[in-house]
Amino acid sequence: MAFVQVEDLTIHYEIEGNGKPLIILHGMGNNSQSWKKQLKGLSEQYTVIAWDAPGYGLSSDPKVEFKEFKEFADVLKGFIEKLGLKSVILLGHSMGSAIALDFCYRFPDLVDALIISDATRGSAALTKEENESKLKNRLKNIETLTPEEIAKLRVKSLLSPEPSPEVLKEVERIYSQIRPMGFRSVAYSLYHLNNMDILSCIHVPTLVICGELDKVTPVKESQVFHEKLQDSKFVIIPGTGHLCYQEAPETFNTIVLDFANTLIKQTEVPIK
């Protein structure tokens, strides 16, 4: 358990391993706890750092709700600078992918490679009416329901039709830790999100991952990212839903390691 101060925010993170830094960004209903099998499985070869976004986990709340993902990305930049890192591999899941894409677009020199899992297009994937309805429902839920009630309402849609009882229980436990400030910040940011125009400007090697049975951001959504990102590879994880990294952690980790290790080998200079 570790903390850094980024302006007026205290950011909590978990860190394991040695080697090139790999920073992992969680989704709307998660926090750093959801990455425990990545912290273990990837840390033999990389320094794996999983943060709690502002308003999540053990990180502090912003004073005012964020309205766009670039605000999260600005905090991420300060976070990376406070850790003294020159460049990183960046992995974002769901809303974390939106933060990662914005960060990579605006701060390309800090990113060696990009991994987006079950990525969201936010408002770009919805009609105006659908987008407004989603925002309204999210804000109403966080105002009128307990975090536990929201978890019960949402978790089944995040997993495959027949998830293991252990995974279901863990996902519900973590989702029940959501807080109003973080949840509202992501709700507003998703409402305003349209990252389609920046994708052609991202030039780092990119891996796009998606769970085969993802109902939240289906495979066809990830296909859009794959087609628009110039240097990307697309992998589908069979039999998994939106939280593919929790349902099939070993498969997910193998895919990430294969991608990252290939890039490192390509950049190694042969000894003469």
Image (spheres, rainbow, N blue to C red):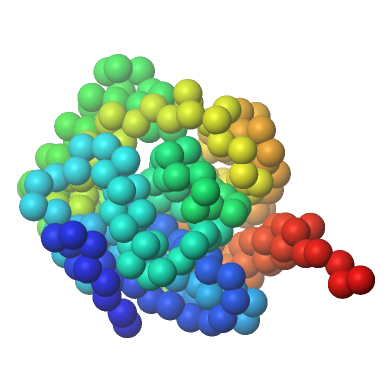
Viewer can see residue 268: yes
Most extreme residue toward the right is: 272
Task: Measuring from the top left, give residue 266's x and y in whole percent.
Answer: 79, 58
Residue lying at 34% horizontally and 31% vertically, measured from the top left: 193
Q: Quadrant of residue 53?
A: bottom left
Task: Measuring from the top left, give residue 206's x and y in whole percent.
Answer: 63, 46
Task: Measuring from the top left, give residue 245's x and y in whole percent.
Answer: 53, 61
Q: Quadrant of residue 80?
A: bottom left
Q: Nearer the viewer, residue 82 or 271?
A: 271
Viewer can see residue 117: no
Residue lying at 26% horizontally and 44% vertically, measured from the top left: 71
Quadrant holding the C terminus: bottom right
Q: Quadrant of residue 140?
A: top left
Residue lying at 34% horizontally and 48% vertically, measured from the top left: 73
Most extreme residue toward the front is: 272
Most extreme residue toward the top is: 128
Question: Residue 31 vs residue 212: left or right?
Answer: left
